Image (tube, rainbow, N blue to C red):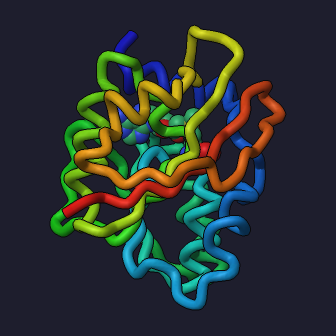
Amino acid sequence: MDHEAYWKQRWAERKTGWDRGATSPALEHWFAGMEQLPERILVPGCGSGYEVEWLARHGARVTAVDIVPEPLDSLRQRLKVQELDAELVLGDLFDWEPTTPFDAIYEQTCLCAITKDQRQAYAERLYRWLKPGGTLYALFAQTPWRNGPPWHCDLTEMREELFTPDRWIWPDDADFTLPHEAGFREDGYRLIRRP
Ligand SMILES: C[S@@+](CC[C@H](N)C(=O)[O-])C[C@H]1O[C@@H](n2cnc3c(N)ncnc32)[C@H](O)[C@@H]1O
């Protein structure tokens, strides 16, 4: 089964254990205390997109991409009811290209959904899609298992292979750790894209 068919089937069968049914606490950690949110934010692999709603409600211009129509349709409806605006893109992140780079990217369990052979290409895109000096808000999935998805995002691999220090400024430690009901945890790191 190809990648797109796989994700369509997961959504059709409601095998969506990652879905919190509400916004991630990461938003409170990172954005709630901010005087002004980054102006344009990308949410790749947004799924149900509760975070898209929250960011739009708090004044950001959000672009959200997913390969499956169903969660995007539901998100579109919820945005409409609340009279909120966001750009929703149905497409494969490996085919899509934004017209201009973003001030920030909010990466919530999309990297861990991507097969290992495509990780490097995805990291390359995240770099390209951010403005120099822009922030990648990354929730790296830490799983006790080694199959996936979600695929474990080993932090040494993240630092040394995908988001290398010549391109990204790393903090010393994670800003926070979030346990997930589905049995893994997410470590929240803010990475700054070097010029
Ligand atoms: C693990 S889910 C995370 C969803 C959401 N970020 C969340 O945390 O609730 C991964 C999402 O990425 C989408 N996805 C996977 N591969 C994709 C691709 N190549 N292009 C666009 N979306 C993709 C899936 O359809 C799914 O909604």
Residue furthest toward the front? 172
| Residue 175 location, quadrant | bottom right
Quadrant containing the C terminus is bottom left
Decide if residue 175 is on the left or right side of residue 165.
Answer: right
Residue furthest toward the bottom? 35
Give the answer, above or below, for where 10 lies relative to 140.
above
Quadrant containing the N terminus is top left
| Residue 54 location, quadrant | bottom right
Give the answer, above or below, for where 51 lies relative to 114.
below
Residue at position x 57%, y 75% in the image: 80
Residue 44: % across, % down: 42, 50
Q: Nearer the viewer, residue 145 or 1?
A: 145
Judge whether residue 67 can be spotted in this image: no
Q: Nearer the viewer, residue 10 or 188?
A: 188
Give the answer, above or below, for where 22 lies relative to 52.
above
Decide if residue 170 is on the left or right side of residue 173.
Answer: left
Residue at position x 24%, y 32% in the image: 121
Judge whether residue 163 can be spotted in this image: yes
Residue at position x 24%, y 67% in the image: 131
Decide if residue 18 is on the left or right side of residue 65.
Answer: right
Q: Nearer the viewer, residue 9 or 126?
A: 126
Give the answer, above or below, for where 53 lies relative to 94.
below
Residue 15: % across, % down: 68, 25
